[in-house]
Each structure stands twice: as structure tokens, then as C-alpha cells.
Amino acid sequence: MSYSGGDGQTLGIILTPKHITDLFCDLVDLKQNDIVLDPCCGTGGFLIASMHKMLKQATTENDIKNIKQKQLHGIELQPYMFTIGTTNMILRGDGKSNLINEDFLKQDAGKLQLKQATVGMMNPPYSQGSINNPDLYEIAFTEHLLDSLTAGARGIVILPQSSMTGKTNEEKSINVSTDLNFPEFAD
């Protein structure tokens, strides 16, 4: 990130620390057979932490091969972050990097469900939404992630508290209009 001329925050990029990626694996109770999707994968931190957690549970060479080749999926919009993420995955021996350099929000949720992801992990870009671009609010990323997972899957997302309460009237209307059920944030 230092070579890009900044820390990435003006682009909404927040790199997730390792202790948080590990915590996500524990909180979601990640199992060896889970299929993980990180639709804003950046440098691949959640995918790497997931791979390590699942590999510790693996008992056969076939299990290890499946985890590395079939159970980790990521999407990243920014080309340079995609390059870093892909490189990180390869350097950590993921076997076959299932990362794509595309816009997650333009992906068909039904097609993403075909990946059979049982766990979604995400740290979406912050502060990118506006009246002109309501699809870029953090809650829009969260809703699309939930729509992209299989029935019964688990999702875990880092969001600023304002994403649940709404910073602007436009964001508040999006939160009210979604069918997400967050009772602890209800008025």
C-alpha cells in the first residue's frame, strides 16, 4: 500500500489485521468442510486465515487438496489489491487461487451461490456510498453477501456502527428498506 502513494483509506480500503482475521474464523466456528467466500478480499487476509484454520483440522491429503483448491473464493475490484491478494495466496501454498478481479456488487448472487459458500467473511470498503451511489454503502455490500451464500450459511462482516444506524437520510432509508434482521439495532 505504501507504494500506491497512500494508506488506501481514501479509496475505502481498510486492511484487516491478522488477529481480526483469526478471530473471525473462531467466531464463525470455521470447520474443515466449509467453503469460504470473501467478496472484498483485498490482500487475502480472511482467506489465508481460513485456509490455515481448516488445514489444522484436515486429516487426509485429499482434505488438504480440497481446502486449497476448492474451498477458498475471493473477489477484489482493485487490480493492485487483487495482485497482492493472489500473490499472498500463492506464497502461502493455496494450491489454486480462486480469486477474481471483478466488482462484487455487479456479480449475480444466484451465480455466486453456485460456489456453495457456507461462510462469508468481509471487510467492505468504507465511506464510499452517497446519494448518487447508494449501492456503495457498507450495508449494500452486506446484503449482497448474504444473498450470495447458500441456505444456512454463516456470514460475518466488519462494519462501522453508523452502517447500522445510518449516517445520512439516504443510508437510513436503505437500512429501513432492507429485510436484514438486526434486532439490537431496531428503533
Image (tube, rainbow, N blue to C red):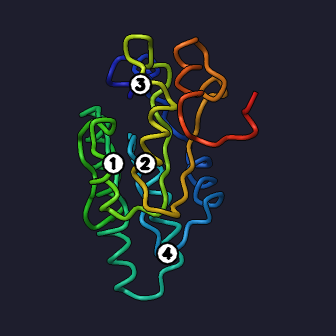
Give how far apart the Cα atoms at labels 1 and 3 are: 16 Å
**Contact check, label 2 and label 1, Cβ < 8 Å:** yes
> Which circle marks residue 181 in the picture?
none
**Residue type indicated by callout 1:** Ala
> Which circle marks residue 136 in the picture?
3
**Contact check, label 1 and label 3, Cβ < 8 Å:** no
Give how far apart the Cα atoms at labels 4 and 3 are: 33 Å
**Residue type indicated by callout 3:** Leu
- Tell me the crowding category of disc 4: few under 14, some 14 to 19, or many 20 or more residues within 10 angstroms, Cα based: many
The quadrant holding residue 90 is bottom left
Give how far apart the Cα atoms at labels 4 and 2 are: 23 Å
Q: Earlier in the sequence, mark 1 or mark 4?
A: 4
> Which circle marks residue 109 in the picture?
1
Mark 4 or mark 2, which is nearer to you? 2
Q: Secondary structure at mark 3?
A: helix
Q: Secondary structure at mark 4?
A: loop
- Tell me the crowding category of disc 3: few under 14, some 14 to 19, or many 20 or more residues within 10 angstroms, Cα based: some
Residue where numbered disc 4 is placed: 32
Q: Earlier in the sequence, mark 4 or mark 3?
A: 4
Give how far across and how far down residue 36 sits, in percent.
43, 60
